[in-house]
Amino acid sequence: MEIIQDKLKVSIAYSLKERTGKILEEVPASYPFVYIHGFNNIIPGLEDALEGRHLNESFSVDIPFEQGYGPYRPDLVMEVPKDELREVGEIWLGMELEMYMDEDVREFQLPETADEFVDGLNLDDDEESDGIYTIKEIKKDTVVVDGNHPFAGKDLTFDVTVVAIEQPSFTELETGYPDREEDFDHFDDGFDGADGEDFDDNNHNRRWR
């Protein structure tokens, strides 16, 4: 496969920067990000820019926040009683939880899988508050959580190299995600955040959707 098109598995290396030039992420060719093209599992501005690109092609693309991780929404920042997190167990700054709302009942838990984590991000839905929340502050009796993506409201620049273009498996086409567990390893332990914090096995990297 030489050209990126829908229903193909694509591996990319990239450097992600703010418009100021500050580097937010770097993914090397030796450990690329893998996704299935055309399933809306990465930000729309980047997927549009990758359409029709060739194997080994390198390019840069500026992506405004509207085509990236959306605007920053203050309504997704909330302070919740610690009692609501009893079932979660140990908590820490930067920990990411999935929140569910059912009428007046609110529940927090750890995302179980990479695809569940990606699907849960609060990016485009103005109505629902369900999704992934990051612990921003721990107080005596309450915890401040933020449902915005870390890059929400940021205009971004991607410097990208297309590393591989492959035919996906049947299950990959069914799910829209790479079906090898190792393809998701960098959601967990392959990324250091912009401020240096590590994303480990219990703290999924929320780069994509």
Image (cartoon, grey):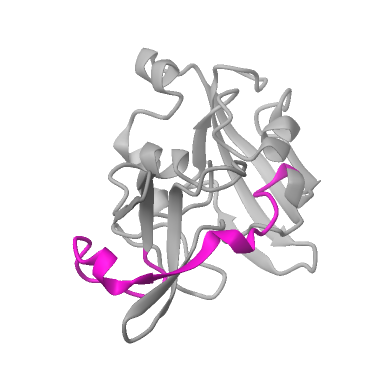
Q: Which x, y percent locates residue 166?
A: 51, 21
Towards the viewer: 48 or 131: 131
Towards the viewer: 31 or 19: 19
Location of residue 29 with respect to 51 vertically, above or below: below
Whether residue 66 is visible, yes or no, is yes
Q: Which x, y percent locates residue 161?
A: 66, 41
Residue under the point 30% across and 53% down: 107
Q: Is residue 87 left or right of residue 44?
A: left
Q: Residue 89: say if magenta.
A: yes
Q: Residue 173: say if magenta.
A: no
Q: Quadrant of residue 204?
A: bottom left
Q: Which x, y percent locates residue 36?
A: 52, 26
Whether residue 91 is visible, yes or no, is no
Residue under the point 40% across and 16% down: 174
Location of residue 36 with respect to 71 vertically, above or below: above
Q: Residue furthest top?
A: 170
Towards the viewer: 154 or 57: 154
Q: Is residue 61 left or right of residue 25?
A: right
Quadrant of the drawing holding the N terminus: top right
Q: Which x, y percent locates residue 141?
A: 31, 82
Q: Residue furthest bottom?
A: 140
For the record, the magenta segment spans 67-95
Q: Quadrant of residue 171?
A: top left
Number of numbered discs: 0
Residue under the point 29% across and 59% down: 202
Residue under the point 36% across and 47% down: 100
